């Protein structure tokens, strides 16, 4: 089972692994053609109704493989408005092959009775649709639903107008361009009522609720596209154009005392990873030094030269207004400090990234917090976990530990392993130069920033590990193994950009 958002990420990651999207579309189209052959007889009239995206492109491919049928491919819109290169290429190939094609730019031009099909392929809109169907799709959907009972309807990936994750129609009747249009006279959103759905790679959560046959087609996406973090994971990041200060995450870094660089690195990295506001809670004795690392940091000092239990109530008050807390960089391991960490985690119920010396108390604490723990392999062992040299074996061990602990765990290494006990991801970016001190603090800050913006802790941690490694790789190109942790934060923004941008 895979959500539509995750499927989009996997599709893009497959391309990054060397499986071209054009190849995947060819496989998808073949799968649709097979489903048509199983439901129609040679010579039957097959009407393929295509949208202007890749969903339509899948049906355009299918049409080229249905020589034994009387096919007509309808494009809803003008060819020049086809949204992707591969869909446009397949439309051009279909036209050049002299297969019957037509375009429909106005809902008044469409009359299903004119085509009298035995089978309809619905490829108007796929899993990326948002909002109710508009014209001409809404009129077409209602016409398909009103077709005689002996007309079979096969949808590509998901019936047009249906949310693949919920099985419900998307939007509502007020979303359409003209709510008074007869297509929506019944007061409901248009959505195709399919007899069968050909979906790809894995079933989508909402399809089982539709009461139709669901065919899951293997189109050649490699397992690594789901396992390895890649550019597709960047789709988890969204930044609304009309957002305001604070809407894209507020992060509190709790650290410092014995060290000043660690919390400053974490905070700078959180800012570079897109958090709107980053505050650093640190001992007053080191506040000036931490503030000196950058004017963008908001420093909130507490009394003394190290964290201790009397500071916990104030930190809880500060943390209550934050989207994520990064707890641990540079705190040290004084007994009073570790007692304070225990008290904080026992009382805190938000999302926290736990790093460095603070990790050792996590197994002792009963907490309602959503924790992302970021140990290296030695720290994992001290937490009671096991590890192994082979990343596959290590992934199994980390998954088991995460499941038992109830936390998301990001284990740093040559291959970063990230697991919440149910799903496990692997990051393959980074280089030997990143063994230098401080790169883990940068990772903690990036994780905190992404955890303040992304709903899934696993997704936030996985993307953080990948981006941190990419920043390290960019630094290594310039400095080799002489890179420093301070070289990474300024390279985080580019690391969080799609390579194709």
Image (spheres, rainbow, N blue to C red):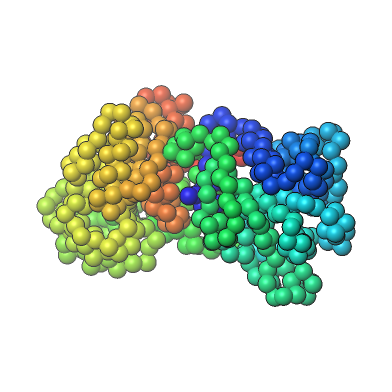
Residue displayed at 85% across by 59% down: 113
- The reply to whether residue 494 is in sight is no
Residue displayed at 46% across by 47% down: 272
Please state if 233 lies on the left or on the right of 31 as rendered: left
Q: Is residue 188 above or below residue 289?
A: below
How many labels sit on residues? 0
Please state if 170 lies on the left or on the right of 413 as rendered: right
Relative to the observer, which residue lies in front, 414 or 405? 405
Which image quarter: residue 106?
Answer: bottom right
Which image quarter: residue 153?
Answer: bottom right
Which image quarter: residue 302?
Answer: bottom left
Relative to the observer, which residue lies in front, 362 or 286? 362
Q: Is residue 301 above or below residue 19?
A: below
Please state if 368 lies on the left or on the right of 72 as rendered: left
Percent of width and height locating residue 395? 32, 37
Percent of width and height locating residue 351? 34, 58
Quadrant housing the C terminus: top right
- The reply to whether residue 501 is in sight is yes
Q: Is residue 69 above or below residue 389?
A: below
Percent of width and height locating residue 141? 73, 61
Relative to the observer, which residue lies in front, 295 or 208? 208
Residue displayed at 30% across by 38% down: 396
Relative to the observer, which residue lies in front, 149 or 238? 149
Percent of width and height locating residue 172? 65, 70
Q: Is residue 216 above or below residue 146?
A: above
Residue displayed at 79% across by 36% down: 67
Q: Hey, which residue is sitting farthest left in the picture?
A: 335
């Amino acid at each position: 089972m895979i959500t539509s958002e995750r499927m989009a990420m996997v599709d893009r990651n497959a391309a990054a692994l060397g499986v071209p999207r054009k190849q995947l579309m060819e496989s998808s189209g073949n799968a649709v053609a097979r489903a048509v052959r199983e439901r129609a007889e040679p010579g039957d009239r097959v009407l393929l109704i295509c949208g202007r995206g890749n969903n339509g492109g899948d049906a355009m491919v299918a049409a080229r493989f249905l020589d034994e049928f009387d096919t007509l491919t309808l494009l809803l819109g003008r060819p020049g408005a086809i949204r992707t290169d591969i869909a446009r290429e397949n439309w051009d190939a279909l036209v050049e092959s002299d297969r019957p094609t037509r375009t429909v730019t106005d809902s008044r031009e469409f009359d299903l009775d004119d085509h009298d099909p035995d089978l309809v392929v619905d490829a108007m809109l796929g899993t990326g649709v948002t909002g109710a169907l508009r014209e001409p799709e809404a009129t077409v959907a209602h016409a398909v639903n009103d077709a005689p009972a002996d007309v079979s309807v096969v949808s590509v990936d998901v019936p047009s107008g249906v949310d693949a994750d919920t099985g419900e129609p998307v939007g509502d009747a007020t979303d359409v361009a003209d709510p008074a249009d007869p297509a929506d006279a019944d007061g409901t959103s248009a959505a195709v009522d399919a007899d069968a759905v050909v979906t790809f790679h894995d079933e989508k959560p909402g399809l089982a609720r539709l009461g139709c046959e669901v065919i899951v087609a293997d189109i050649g996406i490699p397992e690594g596209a789901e396992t390895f973090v890649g550019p597709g994971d960047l789709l988890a990041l969204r930044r609304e154009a009309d957002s305001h200060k604070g809407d894209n995450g507020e992060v509190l870094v709790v650290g410092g005392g014995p060290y000043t660089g660690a919390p400053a690195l974490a905070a700078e990295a959180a800012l570079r990873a897109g958090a709107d506001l980053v505050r650093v809670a640190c001992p007053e004795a080191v506040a000036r030094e931490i503030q000196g690392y950058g004017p963008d940091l908001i420093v909130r000092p507490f009394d003394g030269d190290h964290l201790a239990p009397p500071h916990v109530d104030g930190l809880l008050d500060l943390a209550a207004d934050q989207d994520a807390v990064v707890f641990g960089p540079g705190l040290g391991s004084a007994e009073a400090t570790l007692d304070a960490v225990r008290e904080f985690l026992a009382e805190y119920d938000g999302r926290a990234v736990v790093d460095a010396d603070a990790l050792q108390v996590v197994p002792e604490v009963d907490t309602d917090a959503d924790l992302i723990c970021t140990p290296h392999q030695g720290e994992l062992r001290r937490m009671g976990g096991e590890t192994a040299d082979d990343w596959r074996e290590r992934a199994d061990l980390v998954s088991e530990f995460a499941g038992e602990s109830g936390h998301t765990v990001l284990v740093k290494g040559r291959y970063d392993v990230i697991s919440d006990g149910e799903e496990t991801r692997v990051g393959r970016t980074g280089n030997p130069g990143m063994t230098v001190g401080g790169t883990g603090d940068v990772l903690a800050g990036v994780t905190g920033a992404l955890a303040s913006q992304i709903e899934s802790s696993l997704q936030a941690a996985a993307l953080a590990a990948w981006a941190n490694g990419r920043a390290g790789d960019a630094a290594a190109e310039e400095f080799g193994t002489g890179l420093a942790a301070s070289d990474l934060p300024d390279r985080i923004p580019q690391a969080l950009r799609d390579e194709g941008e």
